[in-house]
Image (cartoon, rainbow, N blue to C red):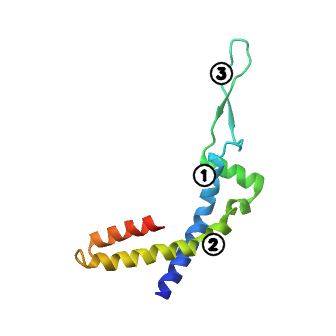
Amino acid sequence: MGFLLLSCRCGGTVGAILTCPLEVVKTRLQSSSVTLYISEVQLNTMAGASVNRIVSPGPLHCLKVILEKEGPRSLFRGLGPNLVGVAPSRAIYFAAYSNSKETLNGVFDPDSTQVHMISAAVAGMNV
């Protein structure tokens, strides 16, 4: 059981580290206070002046702007609290999964697909 918790903690930690930059970009794109807009020039009007159209930036543009203006370390903002929460959430998940599996092995065919699927659903609801 100790090895299982250690491997879950390590797996959760690696997962949190790898997905943190994606979470930062997602949050920046969702934030209304961030002004990462690309101006595109349209055709000239009759008076000769150009009209700009505002286009929402894509994830790659957002990533590029973050790296240029704030540096690579900014992609890992908020990682600390995520890492603190990984171990307890994984421990709760796998404890609920294990308990559900033990109970359901007496109801369905032991270690069947149904047992694993229902146990995973129950564990997911507990976390």
Does 25 appear above or below 47?
Answer: below
Q: Nearer the viewer, residue 23 or 103?
A: 103
Q: Nearer the viewer, mark 1 or mark 3?
A: 1
Could you tell me how far apart the alpha carbons at marks 2 and 3 are, in whole angstroms?
53 Å
Residue at 56%, 75% in the rendered image? 87
- Judge left or right: residue 6 versus residue 66: left
Farthest residue to the left: give it: 109
Does 48 appear above or below 109?
Answer: above
- Observer able to see residue 65: yes
How far across and down, in percent of the image, does residue 1 sit?
46, 87
Does label 1 or label 3 sit earlier along the sequence? Answer: 1
Task: Rate crowding at label 3 as few (under 14), some (14 to 19) or many (20 or more) other CA atoms within 10 Å.
Answer: few
Residue 43 is marked as: 3
Residue 40 is marked as: none
- Amino acid, disc 3: Leu
Q: Nearer the viewer, residue 44 or 37?
A: 37
Residue at 42%, 69% in the rendered image? 123
Q: Nearer the viewer, mark 2 or mark 3?
A: 2
Does label 2 or label 1 sit earlier along the sequence? Answer: 1
- Judge left or right: residue 22 versus residue 104: right
Residue at 51%, 81% in the rendered image? 7
- Amino acid, disc 1: Lys
Q: Which residue is mark 2?
A: 84
- Judge left or right: residue 21 versus residue 102: right
- Amino acid, disc 2: Val
How far across and down, in percent of the image, does residue 19 sit?
58, 63
Q: Which residue is mark 1?
A: 26
